[in-house]
Image: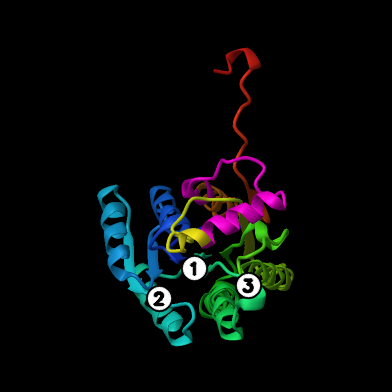
């Protein structure tokens, strides 16, 4: 019996593609030959990204996407398939992150974070996984966070949402065993992105101070989004029969200079 292989054309969906890890993932996948469907609420940012991808020789499609809305996800899924063909890869990257103490957060604020970070991922599964199961192939990749394993303070419900996401994906992964569809977790460490860029300066400083206090910041280096994008591309490019998950991606500490070289 011949070994199953990937089709030559593998359209990929990137949710949360307007900036940071999502934008870098879309460009990296496109450069690797994947036609990409870009989804986010900031459509104008997606159009700029699509133009850049096309200028580099890639294929890109843009459509508005709000993962907190079931109807938006369904419309996006239909449009992506009509534009690019059967979707082979889904990258669930859309996320919501806000600073603040849990005791001061409203239940509605936490609910909004869970709606995007956990239920949003499930909406993507519901929209794309049935087709993958019917074709007996496909990749579902979920962008988590190192905070899923070790919570960080004053980030409201973010750590809880990522822990919840990983629990959902681990169960999904077991349920997909033997179907030909792979569910994978990519877990970034500290990464430069626009998430947190709109925080109040004092709130951001408090978060970083608490990271140091609790030993979360061993060194000052942060990853660039392209590092996560390359990891995601490696995961979905693995030959059929190979499942890579979970993948932890962390910034390497700076190389210590010999004492005699210190200024």
- Percent across and percent down for residue 216 are 68, 50
Q: Circle 2 is placed at which residue position? A: 65
Q: Reading the chain from its start, which is encountered first: label 2 or label 1?
A: 2
- Report if the CB atoms under discs 2 and 1 are less than 8 Å apart: yes
The answer to which quarter of the image holds residue 110 is bottom right
Residue in view at x 50 percent, y 60 percent: 202
Q: Nearer the viewer, residue 117 or 86?
A: 117
Question: Crowding at label 1, few (<14), some or many (≥20) Cα neighbours within 10 Å?
Answer: many
- Report if the CB atoms under discs 3 and 1 are less than 8 Å apart: no
Q: Circle 3 is placed at which residue position? A: 157
Q: Of tags 3 and 1, which is closer to the observer?
A: 3
Residue in view at x 67 percent, y 77 percent: 103
> Residue 94 shows which numbered tag?
1
For label 2, the SS is: loop
Residue 227, above or below 68: above
Q: State whether residue 206 appears in this view.
A: yes
Residue in view at x 60 percent, y 66 percent: 155
The Cα–Cα distance between marks 3 and 2, rounded to whole angstroms, is 23 Å
- Image-based side of 143 in relation to 54, left or right: right
Magenta region, residue range: 203-229
Q: State whether residue 3 appears in this view.
A: no
* Quarter of the rendering occupied by the N terminus: bottom right
The Cα–Cα distance between marks 3 and 1, rounded to whole angstroms, is 15 Å
- Percent across and percent down for residue 88 are 50, 65
> Does the magenta-highlighted stretch encompass residue 26?
no
Q: Reading the chain from its start, which is encountered first: label 3 or label 2?
A: 2
- Report if the CB atoms under discs 3 and 2 are less than 8 Å apart: no
Q: Reading the chain from its start, which is encountered first: label 3 or label 1?
A: 1
């Amino acid at each position: 019996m011949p070994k199953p292989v990937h089709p030559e054309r593998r359209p990929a969906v990137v949710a949360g593609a307007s900036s940071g890890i999502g934008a870098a993932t879309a460009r990296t996948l496109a450069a690797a030959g994947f036609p990409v469907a870009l989804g986010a609420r900031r459509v104008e940012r997606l159009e700029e990204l699509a133009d850049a991808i096309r200028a580099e020789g890639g294929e890109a499609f843009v459509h508005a996407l709000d993962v907190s809305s079931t109807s938006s996800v369904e419309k996006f899924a239909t449009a992506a398939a009509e534009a690019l063909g059967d979707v082979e890869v889904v990258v669930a990257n859309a996320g919501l992150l806000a600073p603040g103490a849990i005791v001061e957060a409203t239940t509605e604020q936490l609910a909004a974070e869970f709606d995007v970070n956990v239920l949003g991922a499930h909406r993507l599964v519901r929209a794309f996984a049935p087709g993958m199961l019917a074709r007996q192939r496909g990749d579902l990749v979920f962008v988590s966070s190192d905070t899923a394993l070790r919570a960080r303070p004053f980030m409201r419900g973010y750590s809880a949402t990522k822990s919840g996401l990983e629990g959902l994906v681990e169960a999904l992964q077991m349920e997909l065993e033997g179907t030909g569809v792979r569910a994978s977790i990519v877990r970034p460490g500290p990464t430069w992105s626009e998430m947190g860029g709109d925080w109040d300066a004092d709130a951001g400083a408090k978060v970083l101070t608490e990271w140091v206090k609790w030993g979360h910041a061993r060194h000052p280096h942060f990853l660039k989004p392209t590092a996560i994008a390359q990891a995601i591309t490696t995961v979905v490019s693995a030959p059929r029969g190979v499942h890579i998950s979970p993948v932890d991606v962390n910034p390497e500490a700076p190389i210590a200079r010999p004492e005699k070289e210190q200024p």
